[in-house]
Image: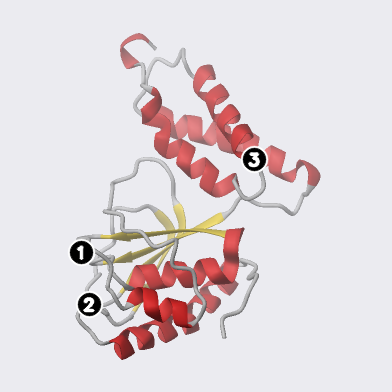
Amino acid sequence: MSDNDLAPEHFDNVRRDLHRRFGHRIDAETVDRVLDEAIAASSDATVSTFLPTLVDREASDRLSEMLTADDPEAACRQEIVYVSRRNAGRTQLAASITRALADEEVAVREIGLEPADGINPHVTPVLEEKGLPTDVLEQIHLVPRTVHRADVVVLMGVDVDEIPDVPGDRYVHWDVQNPDGRSLEDVRATRDHLLELIPGLLAEMGVRTTATVA
C-alpha cells in the first residue's frame, strides 16, 4: 500500500471484536490466523481509509463460515454495551448480572461518558450477596470507534440523554437510579431493578441463559 500502509495496531480493535464475537466457539489461534490472512490479502489496497472495516468484513465472513460448517444453527456472539454517565455503579452491576445469567453466550462491555475515579464501594458487596461475579468489574472511558457495531446499546439513567459515540443496531433507555453517593440499601435496590430488566433483554435478543440468580 506504499504511503497508505497501516501498522498492525490499527487492526487491534478489529482483533478484539472478532475474539469477542467468535471466541465462544472458535479458538483464539484460529481467529488470529484468519484476521492476519485478511490483513495480508489487503496489502495491495490503494486506499487505506476504510481498510479496517473491509478487513473486519472479510475475516468475519470466513469465521462465520467456520462457525456454521458443523452447526448450521450456530451464530456469532451478540454484544450488549451498557453506558452510564459515571461508569461507577450501574454499568458494573448490569455487566456482572448479564455475565452470571448468560456466561459466554453474550459479550458485554460497560463504558462511561465521564468516568468517575473508582467504582462505587457498595457495588462489590451487593453483588457478592447474590453470588454474582466481581472479578469482571472494569471502568472504560468512551472511545470513538470506526469498526464494530454492538447489537444493543443500553443507556442507563436520566443523566444519559444523548446517543453516545458507540454504534449500535438498537438503543434502549433504562431509567435506572444512579447509585453514586447513595446508601448500601439504595445500591441493593438498583441491583434488584436490573435483575428484573436484564432477563427480558436477553430474551428479546434470543440469548440463551445458562443460570438463574436467586
Q: Amino acid at mark 1?
A: Ala
Q: Which residue is mark 3?
A: 27
In this picture, is 175 found above or below 26?
below
> 10 Å neighbourhood of mark 1: few (<14), some, or many (≥20)?
some
Q: Secondary structure at mark 3?
A: loop
Q: Secondary structure at mark 1?
A: loop
Q: Quadrant of the N terminus?
A: top left
Q: Identify which amino acid the numbered label 3 is placed on.
A: Asp
Q: CA distance from mark 1 to mark 2?
A: 10 Å
Contact flag, marks 1 and 2 (Cβ < 8 Å):
yes
69 and 112: which is toward the camera: 112
Q: Which mark is residue 66?
A: none
**In this orientation, which residue lies closer to the viewer: 20 or 202?**
20
At 20% from the left and 64% from the top, the residue drawn is 116
The residue to which callout 1 is attached is: 116
Q: Residue at x 57, y 86 (%)?
A: 214
166 up-or-down from 28: above or below: below
Q: Earlier in the sequence, mark 2 or mark 3?
A: 3
Specify the farthest residue to the top. Answer: 2
